Amino acid sequence: MPELKNKQRERFCLEYASGQNGTQAAIAAGYSEKTAGSKANQLLKIVEVKDRINELMTQFESEKVADAQEVMEYLTSVMRGESRSSVLCFAGEGVQRIIEKPPDEREKLKAAEMIGKRYGLYTDKIDLDADAELHITVDYGGDDGGNNDPS
C-alpha cells in the first residue's frame, strides 16, 4: 500500500506507527491540540488509515530485526577479526580508559562455532531420509483364533 494521498493523515500514520499515542501523533501531524484526541480516534476508525499504520509498523519491525544474512555477516566479521568493541583498559594509578580492540581468540572461536553449527559441521548425527513401514501385531494369547469368549 503506497503512502496516503492526504499528507496530514500520512504524517499521523508515521507518528503513530513509530510509537506515539494517538493524541501525540495527531499533534505532530499538525492537528489542533484542542481536538487532537478526538481527531486521533476518528482517524483510527478509518480502514485506509489502520491499514497504513499496520503496514508501517510491519516495515519498522522488519528494519529493527536482524535477518539470517545479517547475523551470519556479523559472526563472520568477528571470526575474521574485522569487528571492534570498546573495552575499559587499566592505564595506571587507578585510571582507566576506553580502547577499541579486535575480538580475542575466544570470541573468534565462539563465532566460528556458531557458524559451524549453522552449517551442520559439528554433528555426529546421521541424517537418514528413508521410506519405512511399521507393522504392529498384538497377540493376546488366545488359542482359538483370537476369540476368548467363554460361552
Image (cartoon, rainbow, N blue to C red):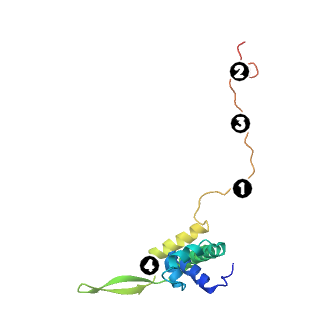
Q: Which mark is residue 136?
A: 3
| Element type where label 4 sits in the image | loop
Looking at the image, is mark 1 or mark 3 nearer the viewer? 3
Label 4 amino acid? Asp
Residue displayed at 57% across by 69% down: 116
Where is residue 113? Give x, y as percent: 53, 69
Q: Which mark is residue 104?
A: 4
Mark 4 vs 2, N-terminal side: 4
* Image position of 31 (left or right of 150): left
| Element type where label 3 sits in the image | loop
Looking at the image, is mark 1 or mark 2 nearer the viewer? 2
Residue displayed at 71% across by 55% down: 129
| Element type where label 1 sits in the image | loop
Q: Which residue is mark 2?
A: 142
For the residues labelled 1 and 3, the Cα–Cα distance comes to 22 Å
Quadrant in which the N terminus appears: bottom right
- Are the two marked residues, 2 and 3, in contact with CB atoms closer than 8 angstroms? no
